[in-house]
Amino acid sequence: MSEQNDSNDGNGRNDQPGNRLRRELPAEVPAPAPEAGQPAEGEPQQPLTGRQRLVKGLWPPRFTRAQLIVAVLLFGLGFGLAVQVASNSDTDSALRGARQEDLVRILDELDSRTQRLQDEKQGLEKQRQELQSSSDQAAEARRQTAEKERQLGVLAGTVAAQGPGITMTIEDTKGTVQADMLLDAIQELRAAGAEAIQVNGVRVVTGTYFTDAGKSVSVDGNKINAPYRFKVIGKPQDLEPALNIPGGVVQTLEKEQATVTVERSDKIVVDALRQAKRPDYARSSSQ
């Protein structure tokens, strides 16, 4: 009886080792309930159907870095093709909607440009043949260089020029001719192969600009009054038709109640000069 009392403490608790270990361990946590559609622990897992395996393989998506780069490149290629197709469609629709006069003008400009390029090609081939066949190639090269210098002087307006061409006179009694109309005439003449142009004593060069000055026009800051007289050197058979095409310069000016006359000539003199502008910093490398 005394031994049983010794094994119990004053509170009547049993101090056996198993009891002490149970008191020190936390209470057991119950296992979570299985989610809906998921088999309980210990139960056999049901096999997935074909649709479930497909969905599981596709979602969530898994991309590698190489796949992302290929996707970006394909997107850029598709976008570029779409823009190109849209641009071609806009050009085709613009030509389909153009008037017959505009189509004739575009075709005439293309023919003139093609002819000029052919002439330039033949001229360059002729220069090459002359250089190859000349006994003194150095003298021939100097001659061609001097000829090229004269041509550039004509284009720059620093030397006078003469040759076949046309004279176009614009009478503007109503004061309706504006600067942009004269600029259109210059552009049309250049497209037709004009090599030198002079308007009322002012030489037209690459940087020439036209502005309105009241009821008159200013060319490169020089005020000119009607009648506006254009002296143009070039092929008369190309220059005159370019001005008289349907919807061209002559018809546009006549709609503004201006009178336009075009005369061909075997000798047109363009003697208005421009002073050569010396560069501020550039110097010839041969000096």
Image: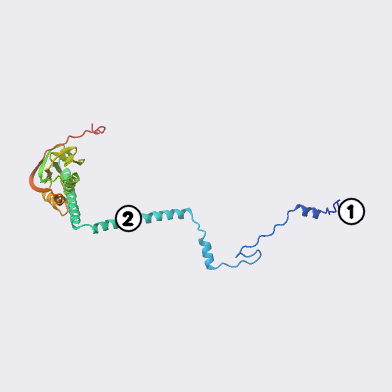
Residue 231: image tag: none
**Near-viewer residue (216 or 106):** 216
Residue at numbered disc 2: 84
Q: Residue furthest left?
A: 266
Quadrant of residue 274 in the image?
top left
Quadrant of the snapshot with the C terminus = top left
Read off the residue under disc 1. Answer: 5
Depicted 32 relative to depicted 194: above or below: below
The image shows residue 264 at horizontal and vertical percentages of 8, 48
| In-image side of 13 versus 207 (left or right) | right
Q: Is residue 76 left or right of residue 59?
A: left
User: Closer to the camera: disc 2 or disc 1?
Assistant: 1
In the image shown, does 225 or 234 lie closer to the viewer? 225
Q: Position of residue 30 (x, y in %)?
A: 69, 59
Residue found 90% across the figure and 54% down from its top: 3
Residue at the spot 89% in from the left edge and 52% down from the top edge: 6
Instruction: Please state, as top left, top right, bottom left or bottom right, where the N terminus lies in the image.
Output: bottom right
Mark toward the start of the polypeptide (2 vs 1): 1
Q: Amino acid at mark 1?
A: Asn
